[in-house]
Image (tube, helix red, strand yellow):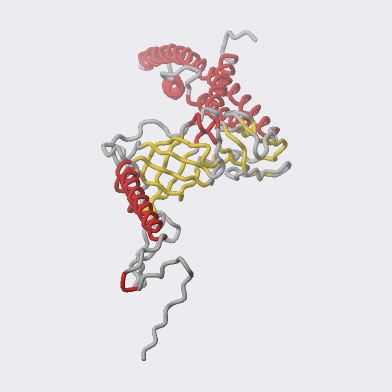
C-alpha cells in the first residue's frame, strides 16, 4: 500500500502550487531593470555630451601643462675697471632706466678727464698757430721774392761791368752765390707754406684733424668718467646681486641682473603631434599654479619653435646609433601675455602654467612673412652721455678761439 503524506498546512491557508505550475518573478527584478535603464540613459547622455564637446570644443583646442614663464634677464656689467664705493639697489627692489645701481670710484676717471680737457684746449691754440703761420709764410715769401729780384738785378748789372774792369770777377761770383741762396730760401719758404696749407686747407679750427683727435680723447675720458656710475638700462626688478662693497670689478663681470616682469612670456612645450593646427596669432587661455583657476590669463601665439628641445640641447641626441627608441619630441611655442593682466597678477620666471590654445582659426600663418624692421629691445639710458660730451667739447673749442671773452 502506498501511503500519501499531505504537507502540514495551517488551517485556512491554501497549499502552495506545485513547481510545475510556474512561480511568480521576484519583486526585485523590476528595480534591477529600472536601474539598468537609468544607467543606459546616463551612458547615452554622457556619450552624446562627450561627442558634442569634442565636435564643438575639444577638436578646436590644444592644451599642455608643460609650460613655463620666461623673460629677459638683463645683466648689469661694468664698462670700465674700478672699485665699488656704493651699491644703490638690492634683490627685489624696483629700479627705473637710467637709475644708478653701482658707483665705482670716479677719481682716476676725473683726473683723466681733466687731462683730456687741457689737451684739447692746447691743441686748439696750436691749430690757431697753424692758421697764423700761413699768413706769416705768405709775408715771408713776398719779402724773399723782393730780395730775389734785387739779387738778380745786381748780378745782371755786375755781369756787364766785368768786361770793362769796373767790377771784379770775384765780386760777380759773390753776387751770383747770393742769388742762388736767395732762390733756395724762397723755395724753402714756399715748401713751408705748402706744408702749413696741407694742415689747414678746407678746414676750420673745430674740424681740423688734430682738434678732432683731441676731441675724441676727451669723449673717451668723459665716457669713462660717466661709466663709473653703472646705470640700469631698463625698468624692472633687481635679482641675483653678487657685487660687494669694496670689490675691484673688471669690465664684463656680472654684478646683478634686472628682470622686466612687464615683458615676460610663456614657453609652452607642445608635442610634435599637436603642432598640426597651431598658427600664429591664435588666442590662448592660461592659468598659473600660483593663482590657480581663479585667475585666467589671455594670450596669443607669438612664434612656433624652429626646432625641438633636443635639437638645441648642449649634447644633441645621436639617433643614428643602433640603440634607437622613438620618443615623441616637444617643440617650444612662445605665447605673449596681456600687459594689463600682468600688472594685476605679476608672474615670476620659471613658474608653471597650463595652456589651452584655440585652434579654430586655420587661416593664420605658421611662420611670419615679413622681416623684422624694429629692434626687439632698446634702451636710451646711455644716449645722453655722448651728447653731454659733445657739448663740453664745443664749449672748450669756443673758449680758446680768438675774440672769446672769459
Q: Where residue 306 appears, x then y in whole percent?
A: 35, 48
As rendered, which of 185 and 32 lies closer to the eye? 32
The correct choice, above or below, for 20 with respect to 207 in the image is: below
Q: Where residue 216 appears, x then y in whole percent?
A: 53, 29
**Residue 169 can be seen, yes or no:** no
- What residue do we see at 71% from left, 35% from top? 86
- What residue do we see at 65% from left, 38% from top? 92
Q: Where residue 226 appears, x then y in whole percent?
A: 62, 30
Q: Where residue 132 appears, x then y in whole percent?
A: 52, 15
As rendered, which of 212 and 252 lies closer to the eye? 252
The correct choice, above or below, for 317 with respect to 146 in the image is: below
Say which quadrant the N terminus sits in: bottom left
**Residue 105 can be seen, yes or no:** yes
Identify the image quadrant of residue 146. Answer: top left
As rendered, which of 343 and 202 lies closer to the eye? 343
Identify the image quadrant of residue 188. Answer: top left
Q: Is residue 402 left or right of residue 165?
A: right
- What residue do we see at 60% from left, 21% from top? 121
Identify the image quadrant of residue 236. Answer: top right
* Number of marks: 0
Amino acid at each position: 500500500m502506498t501511503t500519501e503524506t499531505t504537507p502540514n498546512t495551517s488551517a485556512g491557508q491554501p497549499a502552495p502550487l506545485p513547481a510545475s505550475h510556474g512561480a511568480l518573478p521576484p519583486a526585485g527584478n523590476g528595480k534591477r531593470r529600472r536601474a539598468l535603464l537609468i544607467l543606459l540613459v546616463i551612458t547615452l547622455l554622457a556619450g552624446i555630451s562627450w561627442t558634442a564637446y569634442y565636435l564643438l570644443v575639444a577638436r578646436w583646442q590644444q592644451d599642455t601643462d608643460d609650460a613655463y614663464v620666461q623673460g629677459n634677464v638683463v645683466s648689469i656689467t661694468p664698462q670700465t675697471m674700478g672699485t665699488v664705493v656704493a651699491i644703490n639697489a638690492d634683490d627685489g627692489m624696483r629700479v627705473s632706466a637710467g637709475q644708478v645701481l653701482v658707483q665705482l670710484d670716479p677719481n682716476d676717471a676725473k683726473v683723466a678727464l681733466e687731462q683730456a680737457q687741457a689737451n684739447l684746449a692746447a691743441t686748439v691754440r696750436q691749430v690757431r698757430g697753424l692758421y697764423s703761420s700761413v699768413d706769416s709764410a705768405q709775408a715771408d715769401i713776398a719779402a724773399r721774392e723782393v730780395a730775389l729780384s734785387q739779387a738778380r738785378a745786381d748780378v745782371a748789372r755786375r755781369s756787364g761791368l766785368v768786361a770793362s774792369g769796373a767790377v771784379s770777377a770775384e765780386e760777380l761770383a759773390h753776387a751770383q752765390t747770393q742769388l742762388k741762396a736767395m732762390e733756395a730760401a724762397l723755395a724753402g719758404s714756399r715748401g713751408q707754406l705748402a706744408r702749413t696749407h696741407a694742415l689747414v686747407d678746407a678746414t676750420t679750427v673745430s674740424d681740423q684733424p688734430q682738434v678732432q683727435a683731441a676731441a675724441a680723447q676727451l669723449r673717451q675720458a668723459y665716457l669713462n668718467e660717466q661709466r663709473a656710475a653703472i646705470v640700469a638700462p631698463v625698468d624692472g626688478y633687481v635679482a641675483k646681486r653678487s657685487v660687494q662693497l669694496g670689490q675691484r670689478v673688471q669690465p664684463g663681470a656680472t654684478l646683478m641682473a634686472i628682470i622686466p616682469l612687464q615683458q615676460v612670456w610663456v614657453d609652452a612645450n607642445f608635442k610634435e603631434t599637436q603642432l598640426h593646427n597651431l598658427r600664429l596669432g591664435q588666442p590662448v587661455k592660461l592659468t598659473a599654479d600660483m593663482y590657480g583657476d581663479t585667475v585666467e590669463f589671455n594670450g596669443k601665439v607669438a612664434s612656433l619653435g624652429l626646432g625641438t628641445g633636443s635639437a638645441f640641447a648642449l649634447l644633441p641626441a645621436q639617433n643614428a646609433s643602433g640603440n634607437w627608441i622613438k620618443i615623441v619630441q616637444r617643440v617650444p611655442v612662445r605665447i605673449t601675455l596681456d600687459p594689463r593682466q600682468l600688472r594685476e597678477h605679476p608672474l615670476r620666471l620659471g613658474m608653471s602654467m597650463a595652456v589651452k590654445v584655440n585652434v579654430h582659426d586655420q587661416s593664420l600663418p605658421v611662420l611670419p612673412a615679413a622681416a623684422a624692421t624694429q629692434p626687439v629691445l632698446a634702451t636710451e639710458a646711455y644716449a645722453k652721455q655722448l651728447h653731454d660730451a659733445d657739448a663740453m667739447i664745443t664749449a672748450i673749442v669756443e673758449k680758446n678761439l680768438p675774440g672769446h671773452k672769459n
